[in-house]
């Protein structure tokens, strides 16, 4: 698991390291700049060689510069803070490799913070710094045909939209290798939202020490391109002082998935999935299949009398019970049923609302998805019955129905940082509902009323766009229900279910349909050596 940092946390870690005397700010800046150059050459190894003479005149190079990259060109755009300081280091190190480097500064050199100023001055011993002028930068980007454009204008310190003269450049950069130092300028690193309307679209983003929330949330991954992490010697990422509120990116399975070799099926719990009427049972059957595959000892599908024949024809290992107007009491008299799932293909009638109320009243652990979320949104009385063992799994539309005011805050243009984020939204929703909320998407956020929060980021090398397929959410609801049956706590069930859901999709690959997800779990489990 990797801890995801806010800009303020990153600043605090840096300041603590400097205050402890183990490192200076200047040394951190040097490592950051060197890390960017290394990442550029690793990403595009061809840049480590000189350009053919035919593609441009070799620069005049004083004797003490190496000439191994002669003919390579970089346009480096620096800003008024320490991000700009990193840019001056990058400029110097590329120049030292024989590159032709042009540097433009947004802001006043005399007002740069001390370390950035020091690196500005070191660079000035090697080359010029042009004042910011949009037309001349864009003109140079055309005529110079740089191999790399380095965005070192704003990093984690951006607090408001890009100034118009910066936005004019950053949104008109030519296609090619655009490298963002720490963050694409214009992006709020606490929310992944663009402040105002303009931000860089980078092809490579190189960040330091630990990824920030903005790298994985919202627009972050689309703006960052490829994300690379550079160790600048600030100590281990998994800090011993991580508290329960640290936001962690889920990246690995959990040992809790092991099954005790001596256990009986009833030791692994009994999940009950409620289904809708005839012709509407597919979604609940997907959930039931997922609950069984994830390891619940028994799974029963409960359906109305007129859907019994259809379901009986489609189910084998999954048991079938009739659940109609008589309610849930009879089924739930079996205390071994310890986890419920309501919502997929369920229906929105008065009977279904009554079943949701009975399920909530039973105190059993339960997942409420799809139609059950709509019923909750319609009925404040039902919503008030939510308890700590419930998991809500809304997609963006369902989230809006349940928490319109919170969505309105997310939808409002982000004009100042830190902007209201999907993490803030999920935490606010969980606190209001008094239960776990899993807010779906490529940046799925899972929050508990305590403030505990995890992000299951299906982005970068974990991207699984083929999960956007009908029924995949029903499978997720089933996986979480199965884990609840296996006695996972609500928060852990939601986190582990979300993680397994993406792992199953990654394992299957493109072409995936929802039915494939439960069937892929055995392979994922084998990979975990369960
Ligand atoms: N925190 C750390 O441990 C390290 C930070 N480093 C670099 O330092 C950066 C953070 O530096 P800073 O905190 O100085 O922040 P930035 O360099 O990102 O920008 C801050 C400056 O921009 C101004 N500013 C913010 N928004 C503006 C806007 N919309 N229009 C005009 N001016 C605006 C601020 O007043 C401030 O002067 C990181 O992104 C990283 O690149 C690295 O040197 C390595 C170590
Ligand atoms: N582009 C994507 N990348 C990764 N995961 C995605 C993407 N689109 C959707 N998902 C995931 O797929 C599931 C879709 O759920 P949902 O919208 O409820 O679908 P359905 O109602 O068809 O079952 C969620 O877990 C969501 O996080
Ligand atoms: K930047």
Image (cartoon, rainbow, N blue to C red):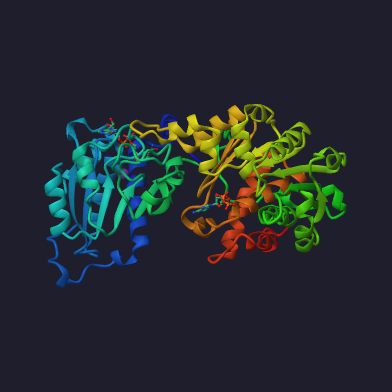
Along the line of sight, which residue is nearer the eye, 97 or 405? 405
Percent from the top left, x then y, of residue 385? 69, 28
Is residue 244 at all visible to an observer of this figure? Answer: no
Q: Name the quadrant containing residue 413.
A: top left
Residue appearing at x 42%, y 42% in the figure: 214
Residue appearing at x 87%, y 39% in the figure: 333
Q: Is residue 457 left or right of 167 when viewed as pictured?
A: right
Q: Quadrant of the C terminus?
A: bottom right
Q: Is residue 138 left or right of 442 when viewed as pictured?
A: left
Percent from the top left, x then y, of residue 306? 77, 53
Query: In the picture shown, does residue 339 fall above or below 458?
Result: above
Residue appearing at x 80%, y 39% in the figure: 327
Query: In the picture shown, does residue 302 fall above or below 5?
Result: below
Q: Name the quadrant containing residue 68.
A: bottom left
Q: Is residue 447 left or right of 102 when viewed as pictured?
A: right
Percent from the top left, x then y, of residue 249? 54, 45
Along the line of sight, which residue is nearer the eye, 91 or 360? 360
Along the line of sight, which residue is nearer the eye, 347 or 521? 347
Percent from the top left, x then y, of residue 509? 55, 65
């Amino acid at each position: 698991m990797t801890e995801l940092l806010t800009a303020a946390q990153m600043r605090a870690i840096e300041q603590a390291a400097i205050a402890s005397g183990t490192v200076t700010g200047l040394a951190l800046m040097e490592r950051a700049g060197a890390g960017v150059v290394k990442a550029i050459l690793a990403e595009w190894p061809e840049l480590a060689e000189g350009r053919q003479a035919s593609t441009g005149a070799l620069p005049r190079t004083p004797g003490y510069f190496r000439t191994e990259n002669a003919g390579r060109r970089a346009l480096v755009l620096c800003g008024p803070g320490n991000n700009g300081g990193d840019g001056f280091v990058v400029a110097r190190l590329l120049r030292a490799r024989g590159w032709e480097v042009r540097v433009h500064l947004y802001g006043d050199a005399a007002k740069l913070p001390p370390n950035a100023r020091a690196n500005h001055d070191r660079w000035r011993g090697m080359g010029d710094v042009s004042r910011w002028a949009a037309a001349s930068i864009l003109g140079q980007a055309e005529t110079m045909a740089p191999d790399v454009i380095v965005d070192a204008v704003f990093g984690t310190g951006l607090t408001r939209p890009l100034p118009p003269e910066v936005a004019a450049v950053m949104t008109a950069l030519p296609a090619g290798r655009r490298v963002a130092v720490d963050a694409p300028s214009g992006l709020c690193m606490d929310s992944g939202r663009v402040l105002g309307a303009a931000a860089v679209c980078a092809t490579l983003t190189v960040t330091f020490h630990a990824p920030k929330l903005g790298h994985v949330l919202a627009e972050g991954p689309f703006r960052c391109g490829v994300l690379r992490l550079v160790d600048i010697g600030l100590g281990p990422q998994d800090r011993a002082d991580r508290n329960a509120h640290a936001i962690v990116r889920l990246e690995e399975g959990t040992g809790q998935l092991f099954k005790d070799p001596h256990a009986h099926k009833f030791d692994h719990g009994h999940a009950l999935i409620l289904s809708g009427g005839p012709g509407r049972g597919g979604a609940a059957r997907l959930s039931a299949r997922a609950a069984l595959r994830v390891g619940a000892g028994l799974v029963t599908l409960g359906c109305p009398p007129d859907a019994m024949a259809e379901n009986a024809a489609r189910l084998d290992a999954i048991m079938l019970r009739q659940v109609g107007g008589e309610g849930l009491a009879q089924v739930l008299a079996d205390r071994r049923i310890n986890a419920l799932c309501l919502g997929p293909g369920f229906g929105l009638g008065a009977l279904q609302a009554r079943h949701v109320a009975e399920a909530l009243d039973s105190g059993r652990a339960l997942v409420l998805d799809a139609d059950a979320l709509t019923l909750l949104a319609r009925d404040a009385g039902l919503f008030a019955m939510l308890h700590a063992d419930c998991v809500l799994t809304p997609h963006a539309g369902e989230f809006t129905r349940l928490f319109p005011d919170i969505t309105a805050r997310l939808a409002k243009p982000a004009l100042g940082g830190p902007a209201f984020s999907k993490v803030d939204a999920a935490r606010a929703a969980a606190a209001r509902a008094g239960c776990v909320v899993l807010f779906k998407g490529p940046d799925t956020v899972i929050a508990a009323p305590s403030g505990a929060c995890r992000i299951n980021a299906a982005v970068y090398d974990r991207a699984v766009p083929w999960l956007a397929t009908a029924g995949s959410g029903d499978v997720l609801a089933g996986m979480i229900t199965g884990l609840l049956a296996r006695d996972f706590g609500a928060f852990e069930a939601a986190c582990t279910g979300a993680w397994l859901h993406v792992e199953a999709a990654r394992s299957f690959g493109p072409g995936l349909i929802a039915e494939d997800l439960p069937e892929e779990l055995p392979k994922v489990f084998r990979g975990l050596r369960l």
